[in-house]
Amino acid sequence: MKLDTLEKLYVDELRDIYNAENQLLKALPKMAKGASSPDLKNAFETHLRQTESHVERLEQIFADLDESPKGKTCRAMKGLIEEGSEILKEDGEESVLDAGIIVAAQKVEHYEMAAYGSARTFARLLGQEKAAELLQSTLDEESETNESLNQLAESMVNPEALSGTELTADSRR
C-alpha cells in the first residue's frame, strides 16, 4: 500500500496496533504463569481481559471504516515479547525475575501508549470522533496498567528483589 494520505497511514497504524494486541493476547497468559508474585499474576490476568476489549474496540473501528484489520505484523511488539520471553526463561531469584517481567511489561505498555496516542490524534484530525473516543479509552487503560505496574514494582517487587539480592550477597561472605 502506498502511504500517500493520512487516512491510509491511520489505517496502517490501526492494523499494526491490532496485530500487536493479538500478539499480546498470546503473551499475557505466559507472563502471568511466569510471575511468582500473586499480585503480579493478577495484574497480567486483569490486563488480558482489558486487551480482549481493546481488540473488540479496534474491530469496531475497522467495521466503521469498512476496512479489514488484518494484513500487518507488528515487528515492534514481536521484539518486545521476545525480549520479555527471555526473562521468563531465566533461572534466578523469583523477586528479581518478577522485577524483570515488570520491566518487559512496561516496555510493552509504553509502546502501546505511543501507538494509541498517535492513532487517536489521526482519528481526530480525520473527523473520526467515535474512533478517537474508543482509542482514548484504550489509551487511558494502557496508562492505568502502566501506573499499576509502577506501583507494584515500587511497593513490593523491587524492594523484595533488593532484599533477596542483599541476602544472596551476604550469604557469600
Image (cartoon, rainbow, N blue to C red):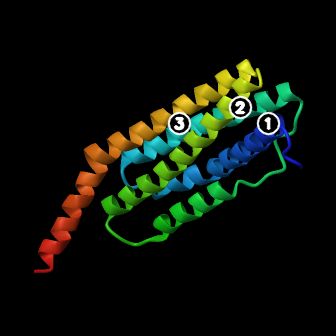
Looking at marks 2 and 3 on the same chain, the residue that comes earlier in the sequence is marked by 2
Contact flag, marks 1 and 3 (Cβ < 8 Å): no
Instruction: Name the amino acid, label 3.
Output: Glu
Q: Looking at the picture, how far across and down is residue 97, in whole percent?
A: 38, 62
Q: Residues within 10 Å of mark 3 (few under 14, many from 20)?
A: many
Residue found at the very far bottom of the displayed protein: 173
**Residue at (33% x, 47% y) in the render:** 153
Contact flag, marks 1 and 2 (Cβ < 8 Å): yes
- Examine the rendered structure and indicate whether residue 109 appears above or below residue 99: above
**Residue at (56% x, 50% y) in the render:** 28
Q: Nearer the viewer, residue 103 or 38?
A: 103
Q: CA distance from mark 2 to mark 3?
A: 18 Å
Could you tell me which secondary element the residue under label 2 belongs to?
helix
Looking at marks 1 and 2 on the same chain, the residue that comes earlier in the sequence is marked by 1
Q: CA distance from mark 1 to mark 2?
A: 7 Å
Looking at marks 1 and 3 on the same chain, the residue that comes earlier in the sequence is marked by 1
Q: Looking at the picture, how far across and down is residue 58, in whole percent?
A: 73, 33
Could you tell me which secondary element the residue under label 3 belongs to?
helix
Where the C terminus falls, by quadrant? Answer: bottom left
Examine the image and state in which quarter residue 160 appears: bottom left
**Residue at (88% x, 35% y) in the render:** 67
Residue bearing the label numbered 1: 6
Instruction: Name the amino acid, label 2.
Output: Phe
Q: Nearer the viewer, residue 39 or 163?
A: 163
Q: Which mark is residue 122?
A: 2
Examine the image and state in which quarter residue 169 appears: bottom left
Q: Residues within 10 Å of mark 2 (few under 14, many from 20)?
A: many
Could you tell me which secondary element the residue under label 1 belongs to?
helix
Instruction: Name the amino acid, label 1.
Output: Leu
Q: Looking at the picture, how far across and down is residue 96, in whole percent?
A: 33, 62
Q: Residues within 10 Å of mark 1 (few under 14, many from 20)?
A: few
Left or right: 169 with respect to 60?
Answer: left
